[in-house]
Amino acid sequence: MTAHIPLLDLGEQYDTIRDEVDAAIRRVVDSQRFILGPEVEAFEQALAAYLDDGREVVGCASGTDALLLSLKALDLEPGDEVIVPAFTFFATAGAVWNAGLKPVFCDVESEHFNLTARTVAEVWTERTRAVIAVHLFGQMAVMDELVALAEARGASLIEDAAQSIGAAQEGAPRGVATALSFFPSKNLGGFGDGGAVTSADPDFADRLRKLRVHGGHKMYHHEMVGTNSRLDALQAAVLAAKLPHLTDWTDARRLLATHYGEALADIPEVISPPVYPGNVHVYNQYTIRVRRRDALREYLSGQGIGTGVYYPVPLHVQECFAALGGRRGQFPVSETLCEEVLSLPVYPELGTERLLRVVSAIGRFYA
Ligand SMILES: *Cc1c(COP(=O)(O)O)cnc(C)c1O
């Protein structure tokens, strides 16, 4: 009996950095400074240096809040429309709803899972004020046409980069805000919840800094109705300790993806994820498309191999959004993807030997 291969093993990673992370936690506990302060500032600066795109980094409590704060900072009217993909994690649309705005769903493109200027234009109305481009599974949506469309029609573009820290696209124009998540399973994960927004606009970043502390820099004076959404100092310290390793971890994910692509090419039933020209994909998920997905998943599970289905139900038919009038058949690509996608283990410590065992098991299933 060979060892179980989980979808993700955070313990394996912790084992490689235990001393650095434990020392960082100890430092915060010794200081007894838990709310904002030097740890959060140091991490924000280190992350800005890592991203190296001239944008400011504002830490907050989660990726969900990074989206919510960005939407609040846009200062839209209640009921204004924000276009989001039907095929994404729930938070993308939930944040729009919770900001008092109306999520309007659009379809995605089948090869790369992302919305495009074409699918966005299809659902545009005169009340559209913003678009959230999700860079799903670690690959950026094609930005130039999206930004051009939003600019031409006077709307804002927010990037949901919760799964794509470190991803890049040659010459890509960027949105006003980029939301990052440090949920433990993301490529840079904390020991709990955490998030950040990046922006090249200093005024926008300043509004975010106010919004995360109830809407004002001066205590007990509130210019806006903000909320409590700070990046925890303990999380910031853990993330700062992990950040120097992110490049290596990303390289490892990319190498695994290359090996998957080569090995899976021999199994005609499997469509492996392509990379857009000019893109750097960081593979938060390595997501294939297959027929008989659920049976394959069951088989792999019996072989001790963990997989994930991101996502089984598209957002336009979620019960909580019934009032928006979404119906089956409306976004056929998103609906088909929900039946066909399967995410395979791609965590940096996986290694080629275990990867090949995953591929062999898939091969046996279709043989
Ligand atoms: C994880 C994720 C979020 C939310 O991040 P949290 O930190 O869990 O709140 C938002 N959008 C996408 C696409 C995500 O994958």
Image (spheres, rainbow, N blue to C red):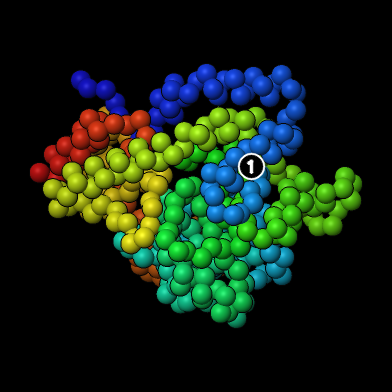
From this viewpoint, is residue 75 visible?
yes
Quadrant into which the N terminus falls = top left
**Quarter of the image where one finds residue 230:** top right
Quadrant into which the C terminus falls = top left
Q: Residue at x 32, y 31 (%)?
A: 350
2, 32: nearer the viewer: 32
227, 278: nearer the viewer: 278
- Residue 304 in percent (x, y) is at 27, 29
In the rendered picture of this protein, how many numbered marks are placed on residues? 1
**Quarter of the image where one finds residue 271:** bottom left
Quick check: 87 above or below 257? below
The residue at the far left in this view is 367
Element at badge 1?
Answer: helix
Quick check: 183 above or below 269? above
Q: Residue at x 82, y 51 (%)?
A: 216
From this viewpoint, is residue 94 visible?
no
The residue at the far right in this view is 220
Mark 1 near ligand 1 (CB under 8 Å)? no
- Residue 193 in percent (x, y) is at 59, 37
- Residue 227 in percent (x, y) is at 75, 48
**Quarter of the image where one finds residue 258:** top left
- Residue 19 in percent (x, y) is at 52, 18
Q: Residue at x 23, y 48 (%)?
A: 261
Q: Counting other residues with Cα less than 10 Å from the Cα at mark 1, is it few (<14), some (14-19), or many (20 or more)? A: many
309, 121: nearer the viewer: 121
Question: Which residue position holds label 1?
Answer: 44
Query: In the rendered structure, which amino acid carries the disc numbered 1?
Result: Glu
Is residue 363 found left or right of 101 in the rendered image? Answer: left
Is residue 356 found left or right of 246 in the rendered image? Answer: left
Is residue 61 found left or right of 261 in the rendered image? Answer: right
Q: Residue at x 32, y 49 (%)?
A: 287
